Amino acid sequence: MITLILNFAFLVVFSFAPQNTSIIDLHIHEAKSDKGLVRILVFDSEKGYPDQPDQALRSYSVPLKDGKCNLKITDLKAGTYAICVIHDANENGKLDTNPVGYPTEKYGFSNNAKAYFSAPAFSKAAFELKQETKHIRIQLR
């Protein structure tokens, strides 16, 4: 009987113990329209960054409303992350470009890192996530 009570107490205590996870509260704004989806890739290393969805830790497709969208990304461990975003207006799953390679759809990165002639380095878009809720705003360009 004592063992049963101790096991129950153990379960109760650890069921309500704080979890070792963090949350990203992501806000994306300045889309041209509400057509299509916002494609979001979350990376925890340079591997595959920024354009290989199969290498991303997480990927999301979110609809727009009034040129913006919000997403809570949960159950992340503390660490270093970078986020890449495109407004996939025609829903073809990729960032469209003109014949010389300049993007014709809006895009953005965490830290609002700027892309000049190519995507910014992982280190420019990277941020530290601790045991917290981190608020990130990405302006589409």
Image: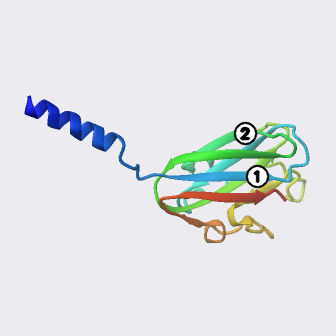
Q: Quadrant of residue 99?
A: bottom right
Left or right, residue 26 beside residue 77 = right
Q: Which residue occupies 46% across, 51% down?
A: 21
In the image, is residue 34 above or below residue 132? above
Q: Quadrant of residue 50?
A: bottom right
Left or right, residue 94 beside residue 24 = right
Q: 126 or 23: nearer the eye? A: 23
Element under disc 2: strand
In the image, is residue 63 above or below residue 123? above
Amino acid type, callout 1: Ile
Q: Which residue is mark 2?
A: 62
Q: Position of residue 121 (x, y in %)?
A: 66, 69
Name the N-terminal-most of marks 2 and 1. Answer: 1
Q: Are marks 2 and 1 in contact (CB under 8 Å)?
A: yes
Left or right, residue 22 beside residue 67 = left
Instruction: Look at the image and tell me in which quarter the C terminus lies.
Output: bottom right
Q: Which residue occupies 80% across, 36% down?
A: 91
Any part of residue 49 in sight? no
Crowdedness of circle 1 by 10 Å Cα count: few (<14), some, many (20+)?
Answer: many
Color style of the picture: rainbow
Q: How many marks?
A: 2
Q: Position of residue 24 (x, y in %)?
A: 60, 53
Q: Which residue occupies 87% across, 59% down?
A: 102
Q: Which mark is residue 28?
A: 1
Tell me how far mark 2 sits from mark 1, CA to CA. 10 Å
Q: Which residue occupies 72% across, 39% down?
A: 62
In the image, is residue 86 above or below residue 81? above
Q: 93 or 59: nearer the eye? A: 59
Amino acid type, callout 2: Val
Q: Which mark is residue 15?
A: none
